[in-house]
Image: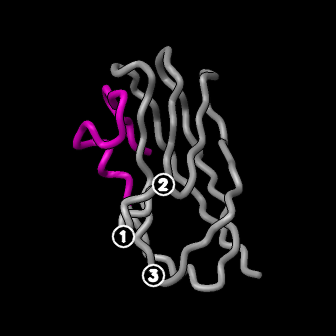
Amino acid sequence: MDTLTNIGTAYDTTAASKGLGFTDYDLTGVTSLVFTVRQSRVGSGTVSWQLWNETDSSQVAVVSTAVSGDSYLTTTVALALTGIKRLRVRAKSTVSTDDPLYYGCAIRLIRG
């Protein structure tokens, strides 16, 4: 579990928000992706968790919540990416002083 203190209103505004890990995926033949974040919203803003394609500097998926407490947030997105991409999770909130808890994420690739 990572506590992100004062995460800010833009992605990667604090050193802590860069520490959510990364992984490389070969997305060749992948047609869609399911992105799930396990988190706890702590604060008063709307927290957004973004799956970031660091290789191409682009957003892959985003999930958001304004509900307090622990939850799983899930979205499915169509993909048009190919090759190996480095993906990582980033966070932000509409209230810069929010301190959400990040428990982890799951990424499921769907082919064909």
Quarter of the view holding residue 77: bottom right
Whole-percent x and y of residue 41? 53, 27
**Category of crowding for the residue at label 1, using alpha-carbon neighbours closer than 10 angstroms: few (below 14), some (14–19), many (at least 20):** few
Residue under pointer 2: 59
Residue 101 vs 84, above or below: the answer is above
Quarter of the view holding residue 52: bottom left
Tell me the element at label 3.
Answer: strand
Residue under pointer 3: 84
Q: Amino acid at mark 3?
A: Ile
Using the numbered discs, state the Cα–Cα distance from disc 2 to disc 3 in whole angstroms. 15 Å
Whole-percent x and y of residue 71? 65, 36
What's drawn in magenta, residue-wise? 1-21
Q: Could you tell me if the residues under marks 3 and 1 are in contact, i.e. CB atoms within 8 Å? A: yes
Q: Amino acid at mark 1?
A: Thr
Of residues 69 and 94, the one drawn nearer to the viewer in this rendering: 94
Tell me the element at label 2.
Answer: strand
Of residues 87 and 1, the one drawn nearer to the viewer in this rendering: 87
Residue under pointer 1: 55
Give the mark count.
3
- Judge whether residue 98 is colored magenta: no
Between circles 2 and 3, the one closer to the viewer is 2
Q: Could you tell me if the residues under marks 2 and 3 are in contact, i.e. CB atoms within 8 Å? A: no
Using the numbered discs, state the Cα–Cα distance from disc 3 to disc 1 in whole angstroms. 8 Å
